[in-house]
Amino acid sequence: DTGSAAAVPINEVDIAYVTPVTVGTPPQTLMLDLDTGSSDLWVFSSLTPSSQVRGQEIYSPAKSSTSKLLSGHTWSIRYGDGSGSRGTVYTDNFTIGGLEVESQAVQTAQEVSSSFTQEQSLDGLVGLGFSTLNTVRPSSQLTFFDNARPKLDEEVFTADLKYHATGSYDFGFIDRAKYTGNITYTPVQQSPGYWTHSLSGYAVGSGAFQSTQIQGISDTGTTLLYLPTAIVTAYYRQVQGAQNSQYYGGYVFPCSSTLPTFTFGIEGARFTIPASYINYTRISPTSSTCYGGLQSSSGLGINIFGDVALKAAFVVFSGTNPPRIGFGTK
Ligand SMILES: O[C@H]1CN[C@@H](c2nc(-c3ccc(C(F)(F)F)cc3)no2)C1
């Protein structure tokens, strides 16, 4: 089997992407954020206090003839930005892009943090990290990809995220129409559960490529690209008026500045992020100061190849044994 679904940016700066999914019988449609940096599938639900729901679609297990309570099981998760949620668990039919998993663990939120309440076009997350990261207790649950795997034509899913446009996630096949040339693969270290791999180096604008291994995680749920401080300062040294602002918590610059491109390597292949992707957003609607899409990872303890980098390529997440990740030019 295969599946294919849209990845729709939730605002005008691509802060996150949501994908239509269906849960239960008859199908209830929700828009979920597919996140390769976590492994919980959770949804706003009929169990979420109405004071915490602001425009989101909810899953009501009571309205589904195929829902089953996973008795005694709970979950609680915290994301990199400090947001979080927690609740109980049902199993139910779950589909993405026509690909169905009969008994998917669907984690129903009983509490969500304020930043989820405020994000009214996001109804929950689908974790596509390794199932070892799942937070359901006493027994952890499998991701949609792990459940779907036995029925997939090929043990892969792909991400084709786009700049200020709708892209796609495919399951079980690699769509040759979505990239040119060949996919370049590199090994993934699946512990502790992220899609962890290395870049083979980088270049700032037309500068020489610096060959250096940079280990990090490819994380579709993270908006920006976070790299070591030395690389980030080398980049913004090329930007007139750029500064690392304590106040704004990162590199900002005059919106009128000319930004260089940023190139990263996967093995011998090279992928160039256009300057426009790195001119991420105005710090406020009327400001002439802009916030960068490339920021330092020094406070995170890990480098994160988020959407600013991933949307510059066609990315294959391969669940083969051993797992690997592939990048294609598009
Ligand atoms: O934890 C890491 C795993 N992947 C990264 C991730 N972060 C979120 C997220 C989504 C939406 C929101 C909110 F809607 F604004 F609240 C917040 C965080 N989803 O994946 C970070």
Image (spheres, rainbow, N blue to C red):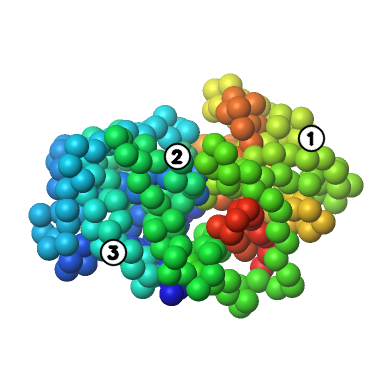
- 11 to the left or right of 310: left
Residue 304: percent from left, percent from top = 60, 40
298 above or below 322?
Answer: above
Find residue 185 and report its image quarter: bottom right
- Looking at this rendering, what residue extends furthest in the bottom direction? 177
Residue 194: percent from left, percent from top = 54, 42
Q: Name the residue under label 1.
A: 234
Quadrant of the picture in which ligand 1 is shown: top left
Label 3: how many Cα within 10 Å (few below 14, some 14–19, many 20+): some
Task: Please report the residue visible at 64 percent of the width from the left and 36 percent of the height from the top.
Answer: 303
Task: Please report the residue visible at 28 percent of the width from the left and 40 percent of the height from the top.
Answer: 117
Tell me the amino acid under the disc marked 1. Answer: Ala
- Looking at this rendering, what residue extends furthest in the right direction? 208
- Residue 133's disc is 2
Label 2: how many Cα within 10 Å (few below 14, some 14–19, many 20+): many
The answer to which of marks 2 and 3 sits earlier in the sequence is 3
- Of tags 1 and 3, the one toward the viewer is 3
Q: Is there CB contact under 8 Å for labels 1 and 3?
A: no
Give the Cα separation between the discs numbered 1 and 3.
50 Å
Q: Does the residue labelled 1 lie within 8 Å of ligand 1?
A: no
Tell me the amino acid under the disc marked 3. Answer: Glu
- 90 vs 98, nearest the viewer: 90
Query: What is the quadrant of the N terminus in the image?
Result: bottom left
Q: Name the residue under label 3.
A: 102
Determine if residue 265 is in view.
Answer: yes
50 above or below 184?
Answer: above
Task: Please report the residue visible at 29 percent of the width from the left and 35 percent of the height from the top.
Answer: 138
